[in-house]
Image (cartoon, grey):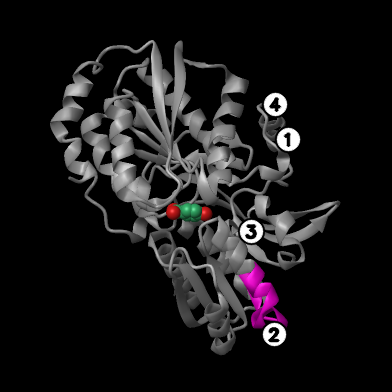
Amino acid sequence: MGAGTRFGTGVIIAGLLLSTGALADTVRVGVVGPFSGPYAVYGKNFRLGIEAYVSAQGMKAGGHEVSFVYRDLDAPNPARAKAIAQELIVKENVQYLAGFYFTPNAMAAVPLLKEAKVPLVVFNAATSSITASSPYVVRTSFTMWQNAVPAARSAGRLGIASAVTAVSDYAPGIDAETAFRTTFETLGGRVRDSIRIPLGTSNFASVMQRIVDSGADGVFAFLPSGPATFGFVRAFHESGPRQMGIKLLTTGDVVTEPDLPALGAAGVGVYSTYHYAVSHVSPENAAFLERIAAVGGQRAEVAMTAVAAYDGTHLLYRMIEATGGARDPDRAIEAVKGLAWTSPRGPVSIDPVSRHIRQTVHLRVVERSGDGYINREIDSFPDQPDHGFEAVPRPPAR
Ligand code: PHB
């Protein structure tokens, strides 16, 4: 019997009858992420971001204590994601869901939100269609379109007139490929080849050969941050493309800070577009990094998922305040539409239509700095929306 049938609709409703309408003294938030396995550093960053926010703002929102219930999901696994989300809703009685590193896992939880009256704050999963698929989803991370469009706009100044795209073969990869190709071609660029790499690939020799054979000036690449991004950058450095002077331009996922020390020289010179660099210079980022240190985080392990969780917790607190701790997803979501604040990454706001975060996207380059390596910001694209929101089919607005 599949996970979907084991926890049927009736079970969810029965569980909810106990809590609907009642004001909860403690509001529980279920956080799903990779807390073990090869992506564990990004799940750890979810936790660090939440704990840094709570240590700064206190454990209460609108007079209600907030508690976080963590559940580990170490890989894309929609059936397991759905079962975990149901368990959090029914058994743990959470009023909010948050986290979700991988798109397929977030998509599996979305169909539960409406009936369970549970808003979802996405801390990472970056396919545009996620917020479009339910009015109860908000997202504080980024989308592939949001970062890939500025990448395509930057290609010309990096001397890339023709490109090959290389992306992981699943939803965010397809978004990244489409966003880069359409923008690059509109600007007069030529895409010579589009390579789709199966998730789980660890040997990139044939990908590198295809890049060389394409005759392109540059590669645009996206893979989900983790073992594959590390392997891809290493392979690029050690094989033909780098030696031939082909440029590597990626989304920031491919060169996250936790990987930079071990990549060493292999990372230097990689261009990327992204919404957050740990080296970003601002008072808000300095305060954020101090708070991360105060809750036990090492600077070397900080990644984008910590800032998404920190800002996501900000939204959870605003929603709990606005609803007085009651289960009222419509009021909760309304309360954060249009909300603007200064994040550690810079000025941000929640787009009232897409419910996705608008933010500055930077062009960066990996450089040596002191004893380590950083993504140095060299250009910026302010107030970027999710360029993909308009491009995806979605149900009519309620
Ligand atoms: C996703 O599955 O949406 C995803 C995962 C990791 C990333 C980016 C996107 O770095």
Residue at mark 3 to residue at mark 2: CA–CA distance: 21 Å
Residue at mark 1 to residue at mark 4: CA–CA distance: 12 Å
Can you identify the residue that label 1 sits on? 286
Question: Is the residue under label 4 in contact with that under label 3 (CB below 8 Å)?
Answer: no
In x, y percent, where is residue 327?
Answer: 30, 21
Q: What element carries label 2?
A: loop
Asked whether mark 3 lies closer than 8 Å to ligand 1, one says no
Q: Which residue is drawn at 66% across and 79% down?
A: 239
Question: Is the residue under label 4 in contact with that under label 2 (CB below 8 Å)?
Answer: no
Q: Nearer the viewer, residue 379 or 108?
A: 108
Residue count near mark 1 (Cα–Cα under 10 Å), binned few <14, some 14–19, many ≥20: some
In x, y percent, where is residue 369?
Answer: 82, 54
Q: Residue 244 carries which label?
A: 2
Q: Which of 297 and 27 is in front in this view?
A: 297
Can you identify the residue that label 4 sits on? 294
Magenta extent: 234-249
Q: What residue type is labelled 1?
A: Ala
Q: Residue 274 carries which label?
A: none
Q: Which amino acid does label 4 sit on?
A: Ala
First in residue order: circle 1 vs circle 4:
1
Question: Is the residue under label 1 in contact with that under label 3 (CB below 8 Å)?
Answer: no
Can you say which quadrant of the picture contains the N terminus?
top left
